[in-house]
Amino acid sequence: MTTTAPRPVTTVQTVATLIRDRATAAPDQVALREKSLGVWQETTWAGYWDAVETAAHGFLALGIETGDRIAIHSENRTEWVVTDSATVAVRGISMGLYPTNPSAEVEYLLGNSGSRVHVAEDQEQVDKVLAVKHNLPELEKIIYFEGRGVDRYEDPMLMSWDAFMELGRSHRAANSHALTERMAGATEDDIAYLIYTSGTTGPPKGAMLTVANVNYVVQRLADTGGIIDPPPGPEDELVSYLPLCHVFEKAFGHWFNVGKASVTNYGESLDTLPTDLREVQPTIFEAVPRIWEKMHASMLIRMSSASLLKRLNYGFWMKRAEKLGKRLVDNGGTWTPWMRVQYGLGYLFLYRAVKERLGLKRCRYGVSGAAPIAPEILEFFMGIGVPIYEGYGMTENSAVATANRPGRVKVGTVGEPYDDIELKLDEQTGEILIRHPGVFAGYWRNPEATAATLDADGWLHTGDVGEWVDGTHVKIVDRIKDIIITAGGKNISPSEIENTLKMSPFVGEVIVIGDRRKFLSALIGIDYDVVSEWAQRKGLAHTTYRDLAEKPEVRELIQRQVTDANAKFASVEQIKKFGLLTKELDHEEGELTATQKVKRSVIEEKFAEEIEAMYR
Amino acid sequence: MRGRPGLFTRYEDASAILPSGTQKVWLGIGLAVLVIAPFIVDRATLILLATAVVAAVGAIGLNLVTGYAGQVSLGHAFFLGVGAYSAAAIGGQPEEGKELIALGLDLWISLPLAGLIAALCGIVVAPVALRLRGLYLALVTLGLVFLGEHIFRNWTQLTGGQGVGREPATLSLFGYRFDLDGSVLGIDLIREQQIYFLALVVMVVMALLAKNLVRSRVGRAFAAVRDRDIAAEVMGVNLTKYKVLAFAVSSFYAGVAGALLYTVTGFLDPNAFNLFLSIAYIAMVVIGGAASIAGSIAGAFFITLLPEVIENVIHALPIDAETLFTSISTAQIERILFGVLIIVFLIFEPLGLYGIWIRIRNYWKAFPFSY
């Protein structure tokens, strides 16, 4: 007779079981890399699982029960996903905060989710929660990764990551089966994540994603027949830099990693992204349009100050690339032999070098999502040989909705619905409705909002207006709430106009205004770096953002960009007047969401005077 | 990591001597040229090449103290001389009827000892550098050369005295004579080829040692002292230790180079270790490239082969060189050219030949951008 308890077998696949199984199958294979003190420090699958197991025991020692919420407030790093996976292992609910979330939002998110444990990165994030902890009765423990500055605090709630892991180790030594038993109880309906929507209108809502949702995403996006062909595997490298609390990065940077063993690399910060990309040369690169635009703009700036010979070389081959990009766009991304010859020559002279500098030399799948992207940007990247595909998805459907597929790309659309999902357009409003196993379980503690989004038949109301293109591809018109109806009664999608204007590297932010007005106007924010560089070349002395934005020469420059953009639209859709923002929009001041989306209502209120001036 | 040259997972990889495959290829080509060259060129050029290889060792030594640690030294000729005579005294064969110091020991004793004795002299001189900087240090080390010249001329038991001289150390390693014709692995080699290959092996080993030294903690300390010694001291660099170390290591290299320098010609002249020799080494460092091991080697070859090139150019000129240059000899033209070259390089390319290489590399490094 044996005295050890029988080892329970977990039948339901979770993020935790995936890591555990990978640690058994390939213990020495690299799972994660994190750049620290100048080198990329590697974590193997065995090391990864050991850390997750220890942290999970730590949570058990802290008395975390099934369904308890654990909040994470940190930049992307190894400890982020360790905490996250450990939470899922003990059947808790993992909730991420954006590193930029200010104190007031931290209070709202922790209060709304009712988190028992808050895991903060460093002194900055710890200070944010300490300032509001008296309003958070459910909060019990604050764990921090970096001790600098925080170690001197004498708050009984605080606990260092090292002490927490030590707690986990001693708990594991004393109760070696506790975690296995807890994991064995996991069901498909367990809520694994609370992902807060960015909240362009009203406060953020916590979308509940279940274990089944996550498993569906891994299978739908990353298995054979998913979006990437061949599917991601251990040879693939990804750089994780978008916030991990957003479903986009969770899918690519975390779920692909645990589900398909692609290697995730954590760079030093968002500022070092260009260097990190160049070093890692990822094979799969996920980015929001802002990042693609930045890459494009940074190249234009650096090129403008290159030597004559280099500029000529660039000019010649970029013209070829433009033509190639257009051809590719026209025939859905298929190459003809003659195009290959042209590309091969250009590769030798320019494209290889450009791709290498951008860190996309080995990129076999680039994806743009989370917001609409300008077709010209797509053409540019396709032209230099970066396969880039626009996709569509949202937190509420676990990022599974539509995507452009290799060889079947239609620029300006978000692609075709996945094979076995249901997608239809509402007959009256044109709103996109979606039904599949990845659709979320509802909003946390918010049945009204859930009822408004998820109808009785299980259809998800996305809030996006779409239309069919050629019967196969979906084009997103705009958010249903953002559609402008002019005084003349014409329906206009502001985002299309905004994106066209944002194609100019000088333009950073555009907010088109015109609801119930005689004509369209726009508030435009210049891209400080690019305009500053332009001003320097013109010998235009300037100091701050405001100073630069108020220069008559800059106004003229932007006027030219507006005129160019207007040429592409019908008269009613043209911007007749515009005002320049005199400050950079900021998350801290509530003008942008954590994902850098403009909060229209806040802007319209804050800049009411400027707006009225344009209609006077 | 393979295929991702920028992705370093360990510090060892990030500070590797040859971080990229391209560099490995170039090094391979360079070594292949150096190995094949002695079988192609004539004997006169071979002697020059062998001298250049030995000079490269000395140039690396001077570059360590001047290029890396920033201590200007005009006394390199003195250390070369110390090395040459130490080796001759320890490794030379005693001759009948001459009262010369000659212990007749094997090369494996005489070569390192020559280096060590020179290093010892370096350590004695180094404290001066703790007190003086820049021009003043240059002046003191200049004095060293004259001191050395005086000693070498008058210590006849060691040097044979002015106008007489002596033979350098016998190149006998574990009984194998490099200074005679011989055959290695079935390949017949003449005396000069043998010496050349001996020198080449010494140079490669010494270059590797120097490369390792400069990418280590010591090398970083040297660079810190060079860039600003007070700032270096504030950062915790022990000035006394590293300045003395710089002189000691540099002198060791000079000693080893000196031991081999005149073996190919087979005659040591006490007047050889003069200011002009010091300046030639300074030129190697400046033209090759300060703070670069590869540059030191390039500079040594450039300076050593320059007279040959000048001569050929003059002979190739369509005008009658004899009438044009009646008042100046080729040796003088050479000196003038040295001076001009040093000035030109200091003004237009302070990083030397290595700097030109860097410039070409950077053009492609940032391609298609300019920075």
Image: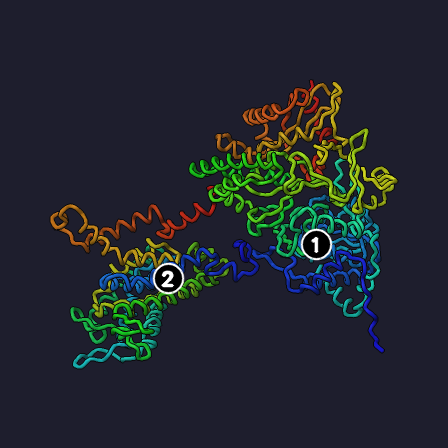
Given the image, on which type of amino acid does mark 1 rest? Answer: Trp
Q: Chain of mark 2?
A: B
Q: Position of residue A497 (x, y in %)?
A: 66, 28
Label 2 crowding class (10 Å Cα cut-off): few <14, some 14-19, many 20+?
some
At a point 66% along the width and 46% down the height, the residue shown is A242
Q: Position of residue B290 (x, y in %)?
A: 37, 55
Q: Look at the picture and state if B210 lies above or below A518.
A: below
**Residue A155 visible, this angle:** no
Vertical relation: B273 (above or below) A273: below
Residue A173 is situated, as x and y percent measured from the top left of the image, at 77, 70
Quadrant of the rendered structure where residue A187 is?
bottom right
What secondary structure is found at the residue carrying circle 2?
helix
Say whether residue A322 is left or right of residue A369: left
Of residues A486 and B236, the one drawn nearer to the viewer in this rendering: A486
Residue B130 horizontal side relative to residue A276, left or right: left
Question: Which quadrant would the N terminus of chain A be assigned to in this image?
Answer: bottom right
Q: Amino acid at mark 2?
A: Leu
Direction bottom: furthest residue:
B96
Q: Position of residue A60 (x, y in %)?
A: 80, 61
Q: Is residue A221 left or right of residue B93?
A: right
Q: Note whether B79 is above or below A477 in the view shown.
A: below
Disc 2 marks which residue?
A: B31
- Determine which residue is flagged by label 1: A80
